Image (spheres, rainbow, N blue to C red):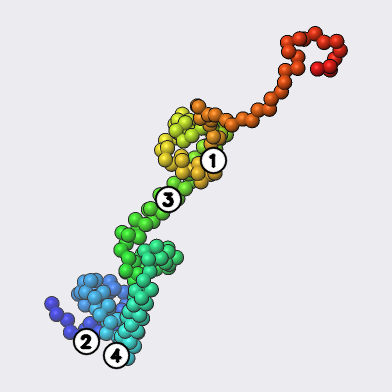
Amino acid sequence: MTYSADLRNHVVQLYNGGTSTADLCAQFHISRSILYQWIEEAKVSNISKRDLATLQRHVATLENENSIYQKSLAALDLSIDNKVQIIDALKSEYSLYTLCRLLNLSKSTYINRQKSALIEKQLDVEDTLLKERIAIIFQKSDYRFGAKKIRAKLMEQGYTVSTKRIVRLMKEHGLKRKQALPENATFQRHYTYRPNLVKQNFIVEKPNSI
């Protein structure tokens, strides 16, 4: 069923005047969905040509500014790390989708970087704890244990860690082993000859005579 423009405008005017939707639907034999459709159409049609032109100019300005921002960012040749830092600083104000699009960075790349940063932070916390445990074991060994023995002690305490990681942590913590003497170590010693004054004669007449 078709309705004239005059009827639609009249119904919308009654609605704006305070007539309830139920009364309008009953009076003009129309459904609520049709009534709401006429109301929305009236809102759009009420925009004047002047307002529409102003809105169009505003949209054009925003598009131009957006283009300038994109070209400026491209000219800066930002690294992925720089882009991630910018997104971190602005994501509370703008959507992640918008920021990634403007910075020409895929959303998956940003999310993966965030996960990697979280893993690195967790490893830093673990390294700090391991350094403390390694230092205690090293001190108890009188600074003689190497990475392998320290690893064995850590495993006894429930820590699973590679020897390579222990070597790195010991180096970062400034832990150096005492140098063990080689099995066939020889030393250059200087001897001074002293004559044998006693000559196996242990009987003397008085103290301090020899």
Residues under labels 4 and 2: Cα distance? 21 Å
In this figure, which residue is indicated by the disc labeled 2? 6
Query: Which mark, by number, is residue 120?
Result: 3
Q: Which residue is mark 4?
A: 49
Q: Residues within 10 Å of mark 1 (few under 14, many from 20)?
A: some
Q: Secondary structure at mark 1?
A: loop
| Whether residue 201 is situated above or below residue 136 in the rendered picture | above
Q: Would residue 26 be seen by someone viewing this image from the given angle?
A: no
User: Label 3 to label 2, Cα distance in Å?
Assistant: 69 Å
Which residue position holds label 1?
A: 175
- Residue type for callout 4: Lys
Q: Residue at x 65, y 28 (%)?
A: 191
- Dot 3 surroundings within 10 Å: few (below 14), some, or many (20 or more)? few
Report the label total: 4
Q: Nearer the viewer, mark 3 or mark 2?
A: 3
Answer with mark 3 or mark 2, whichever residue precedes in sequence.
Answer: 2
User: In terms of sequence position, does the residue under pointer 1 or pointer 2 come before the other?
Assistant: 2
Report the residue at 35% width, 60% height from top.
110
